[in-house]
Image (cartoon, rainbow, N blue to C red):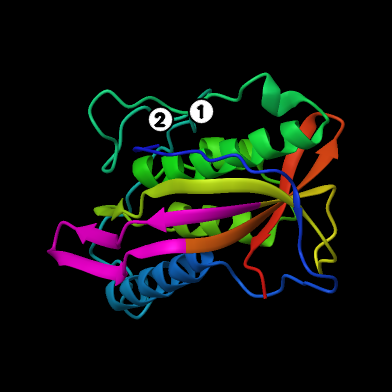
Amino acid sequence: MAGGVFIHRPEVALSPGCEVWHDSGVRIRFVGIVAILAMLAAACGGDGNSPKPSASTPATSPPTTAPSIVPTGPLSTGPGVLPGEKPPVLSDAAKQRTSAGARAFAVYYIRALDWSFATNDTYLLEEVSSPACPACNRYIAALNGLRDGEQLTGSRITIVSSRVVTGTFAVKSDAVVEFVLNDEAAVIARQSSPPTTVAPAVRHDKSLVFVSWRSSGWQVVEEGSPS
């Protein structure tokens, strides 16, 4: 994470009845990125009809598919990685089933999300996300939806502050951590055309990260904004 400043505050209860239902600014921005990628794919996809060989064209053997490589760790380089930057590491504090542990884990999640944007690689994000986390799944699908020759640049996240909050929410979880974030503009770079800015920079975006304890430790179950 580039230049993150962490300000820990005591737990603060949100007003009774506070719910989270709409997307955070980060997620709204990324939904825009998903839409842009879909339009680009449609523009480049053609009519979907594969040409058939003529009677005089000799048949060719199907191409040999190389075995898929299962990643064993996050990428260390990417279009948004700064010189000397390294992937975030889950701290021992983030492995504790405590309020402080929930906050430390949520901070790690934001760092993992930031690293995924920087590298266009979802390894860390997939490790910390519940399979049922809607926001996480959208991030992962959008990054995996980048076509050959496309890169997401910018979109780096800086943490301004974080705190554990309590209250009544529409999302069921064991703990909720509120963040104030600064987000860089998101740009899609393509080899065949000029870069396209798909989301503007946002300052002081509030986001809530919902985490629950599982047998393997904390997992992110949703992300949203205070309503």
The 10 Å Cα crowd at callout 1, few under 14, some 14 to 19, many 20 or more, is few
Majority secondary structure of magenta residues: strand
Q: Which image quarter is the N terminus in?
A: top left
Give x and y (percent) for residue 28. 50, 71
Give x and y (percent) for residue 20. 72, 70
Considering depth in this image, is 186 or 98 the residue closer to the camera?
98
Q: Which image quarter is the C terminus in?
A: bottom right
Where does the magenta region start and end?
178-204
Quick check: can you spot residue 54? Answer: no
Determine whether, in the image, residue 17 is placed left or right of residue 46: right
Mark 2 — residue? 75
* Residue 35 versus residue 220 in the image, above or below: below
SS class, disc 1: loop
Determine whether, in the image, residue 116 is placed left or right of residue 17: left
Determine whether, in the image, residue 4 is placed left or right of residue 125: left
* Residue 131 versus residue 56 in the image, above or below: above
Mark 1 — residue? 71
Considering depth in this image, is 171 or 78 the residue closer to the camera?
171
Residue found 58% across the figure and 60% down from its top: 207
Give yes or no for residue 194 being in the magenta stretch. yes
Residue found 79% across the figure and 37% down from its top: 99
Measure the C-alpha gap from mark 2 to mark 1. 9 Å
Hey, what amino acid is under mark 2?
A: Leu
Determine whether, in the image, residue 99 is placed left or right of residue 49: right
SS class, disc 2: loop
Hey, what amino acid is under mark 1?
A: Pro
* Residue 72 versus residue 222 in the image, above or below: above
The 10 Å Cα crowd at callout 2, few under 14, some 14 to 19, many 20 or more, is some
* Residue 113 versus residue 50 in the image, above or below: above
Give yes or no for residue 61 being in the magenta stretch. no
